[in-house]
Image (cartoon, rainbow, N blue to C red):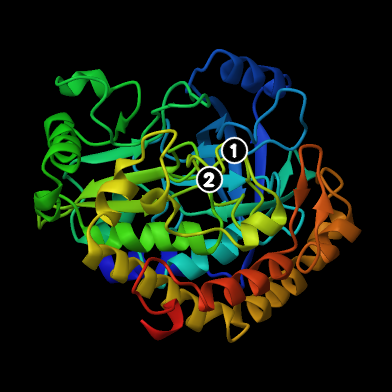
Amino acid sequence: FFQVKLFSQASFYAVDSLREIRIYFYDSNWDQQLDNLYIQGNNDRILAEIVIDGSSYDSVGVRYKGFSSVSVNRIKNPFNIKLDYIIEDQDHQGIDKLKLSNNYQDPSFIREILTYEIAGSYLPSAKANYANLYINDTLWGLYTNVQAVNKDFLNDHFGNKYNPFFKCNPKNLNITPGGENSNLSNAHGIDSLDYEPYYSMKSDYGWRNLYNLIDTLNNYSASVENVLNVDRTLWMHALNYALINFDSYIGYSQNYYLYKDRSNQFNPILWDLNMSFGSFRLTDASSIFFSGFDIFQAQNMDPLLHYTQFSVSPRPLLRKLLLNERNRKMYLAHIRTILQEYFLNQLYYVRGQYLQDLIDISVQNDTNKFYSYTDFITNLTNQVSLVTNDCPGITQLMDARATYLSGYRGFSGQPTISNI
């Protein structure tokens, strides 16, 4: 049964499968209800029937998901759908929760799926594909269908789902200089409960374990490997800096999970990747780029800024680890591996073309999309103007970035990254 369940979930999120999801809300004012719940900061849900690829499920719970991607003035909002909200153990192919992202800040429509695909080669990562969403039989648009990071995910990747598990997103995002957010600093006190506004516990216990990680990282970093999978953490940093995924720990210190495995080490898990490949350029929390950066600076972003420069907002998970020379070498070696396996060989461009070809008709049919069809075609290779800034073309960013990183000399006396 366990093997069948894994196969079903993998098939459901197969990247070449375009899903059809239909929501039938029981109440005609469903959009007003969802708007009100979002404004109130309420995680309650409203009821609906859902049909997934022809299979119908009653009494599912629906709410909006996300932060900047949600707006009460927006038609195409992202959805969090809980199949077992009322009916216990109701699921679709072993899946009891759907997370549908609306491709906000991504004219290319491929940033999230392509980044999850790359990250999955190096870290336990969610799977993702596409779904055409209908609401009350009206096409609402093309969405990214992202696997939930929940207990089923943990069981699949760690063989265990009951250990301490945290989502690292603050209740109130602090974007000012010095903003802590979910950065794993020890600035909030010595009581584990002081950290509740910054981390959301998804397990039955674990606050003392989380504080022990925080205390060890900040005060006894030489022993951090006892409580943290350092190699996987370096992979996370390598992915974020290589792909300029700054709506993450690097930027405002959010959008990741931590799970304590059976070796008693916490493992980071990436989340919310729709603004990777330089779509989010507000900050990297260092003294140089805290106020943001342009496309040229993104192409040439130094991956060791939190080692060579001052961190305006404390980022101990970067700074404390990179003070160790061995960790720095491992980190740069991980970046080299990512470059060689996806970028220098242009595999990422081939995959990007494949994904865009797969969804081309669906993008054309999506009348609620935030960008034009021309923007969709253009943004794989060239920048597109958004309201807030220019969204770089994916190859425009990454071809130049791969060139820069291939010749990178991280610190005195070290070879270039291509020779490590």
Q: Residue at x 55, y 32 (%)?
A: 62
| Residue placed under numbered mark 1 in the picture | 79
| Residue placed under numbered mark 2 in the picture | 99
Kindly identify the amino acid type of the residue bearing the numbered disc 2. Lys
Kindly identify the amino acid type of the residue bearing the numbered disc 1. Phe
Name the element at disc 1.
Answer: strand
Asked if one can make out residue 13 in the rendered structure from this viewpoint, the answer is no
Q: Residue at x 54, y 53 (%)?
A: 245
Q: Mark 2 to mark 1: distance in Å?
A: 6 Å
Is residue 203 left or right of 6 when viewed as pictured?
Answer: left
Is residue 386 left or right of 27 when viewed as pictured?
Answer: right
The spot of residue 43 in percent (x, y) is 47, 23
Name the element at disc 2.
Answer: strand
Q: Residue 357: which quarter of the image? A: bottom right
Badge 2 or badge 1: first in the primary sequence? 1
Q: Residue at x 74, y 69 (%)?
A: 356
* Picture layout, residue 38 above or below residue 8: above
Which is more toward the observer, 200 or 36? 200
